Amino acid sequence: MCMTAGCRTPSCLGSEGGRDVAADLEQLRERVRAAARDKTPLKICGGGTKSFYGRATNGRVLDTRDYQGIVDYDPTELFVTARCGTPLAELERVLTTGRQMLAFEPPHFGASTVGGAMATGLSGPRRASAGAARDFALGMRVIDGRGQDLRFGGQVIKNVAGFDVSRLIVGSLGTLGIISEVSLKVLPIPAESATFVREAGEADAIALMNKWAGQPLPISATCFVDAKLMIRLSGAAAGIKAAQEVIGGQTLPDDVEFWQSVREQTHRFFSGVDELWRFSIPSTAPALGLGPTLIEWGGAQRWIGARGNGGELRAAAAKARGHATLFRSSGPRDDVFTPLTPALARIHRNLKRQFDPDGILNPGRMYRDL
């Protein structure tokens, strides 16, 4: 592969390996059409690295990994277009040659694919400062439940108009369609990054993160765990030095490894809990006291290891004006997401009916009847 940043020739964008990609796409569409005719549920699968996430679903496996490759990459326009089966690691490697990145830092959890990353819509430590996965989706090609090849959005922001269906698809766990291609906004890799650590209790850490969020500091990630508050600063060296004088703390020497352990959930905190709940609440919410806790996103995302009544945990999240998701569990996965209100449930059912009228795409992955 050519390593010249900005080159958009097929040799630079990745060899097709002699495959007929149009035939690969048509094969995916035909499998969906056949399933629709037979009313056979399909279990959409890429790398399978996030199969633990969401409700358990059954069906004939539809593997998307053969449909892969980087279609277009233009560093000057800050976008990349890739097919669903493209390994996420390969996409990030190509972006690195142009000194660019996926700013929402999607977790891999193994050999993840681009399609899987967008279907789950998960974001990593930089989400609070850069934005969520759906904020970077410029356009998509989607195979719906009829096998139709649909296009939404564009490749650059100035060409995106109308209802933003691409962002609707992100995080829908394959229940509305198969993301066959996606165009993503990319950003430059910061010139410098450094992480500083200071001792803190949970309440003090929450107060400090919210205090600093209101100041012009180049904070790109925060994490509280094991009575320590980690703050990552990214940008120009002079800006990092000035910000460090404000926040204090000691330099964390292995910060790349640390942030990767948080993003990929290989940090010892995650291995020490039986059930992992993700609380999305206002950053200013006080400590919840529900179990072992790791806090990210300036206080807005709290990972809590708590085995107990899901209703009680969700009630605690609602009291804090947020919601809770059962992210990982070795037991039943029936009620993973917060139950929908009747009005929202009606919207979800209508969307499912429009995109997947026969209900064959990952049925029940998000909610029992969707």
Image (tube, rainbow, N blue to C red):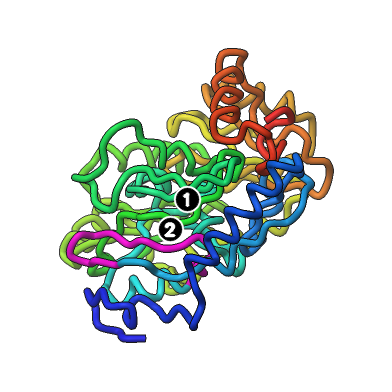
Classify residue 345 by image quadrant.
top right
| Membership of 81 in magenta stretch | yes
- Residue 234 image point, x, y percent: 28, 61
Residue lying furthest right in this view?
A: 331
- Residue 326 image point, x, y percent: 68, 39
Image quarter where the N terminus lies is bottom left
Q: What segment carries the magenta color?
A: 73-89
User: What kind of residue is marked 2?
Assistant: Glu
Residue 143 visible in the picture: yes
Q: Nearer the viewer, residue 51 or 258?
A: 51
- Residue 87 image point, x, y percent: 52, 69
Q: Residue at x 16, y 64 (%)?
A: 238
- Residue 323 image point, x, y percent: 58, 28
Mark carried by residue 3: none
Q: Alpha-carbon neighbours of circle 2 within 10 Å: few (<14), some, or many (≥20)?
A: many
* Residue hosting label 1: 123
Classify residue 40 by image quadrant.
top right
* Residue hosting label 2: 105
| Membership of 53 in magenta stretch | no
Q: Nearer the viewer, residue 356 or 186?
A: 356
Look at the numbered disc 2 and give the secondary structure of its residue.
Answer: loop
Residue 107 is left or right of residue 208, and the answer is right
Q: Alpha-carbon neighbours of circle 1 within 10 Å: few (<14), some, or many (≥20)?
A: many
User: What kind of residue is marked 1?
Assistant: Ser
Q: Nearer the viewer, residue 260 or 231?
A: 260
Look at the numbered disc 1 and give the secondary structure of its residue.
Answer: loop
Q: Contact, CB < 8 Å: mark 2 with mark 1?
A: yes
Q: Nearer the viewer, residue 283 or 76?
A: 76
Residue 316 vs 127, above or below: the answer is above
Q: Residue at x 55, y 49 (%)?
A: 178
Q: Residue at x 63, y 64 (%)?
A: 47
- The Cα atoms of the two marked residues, 2 and 1, are separated by 6 Å
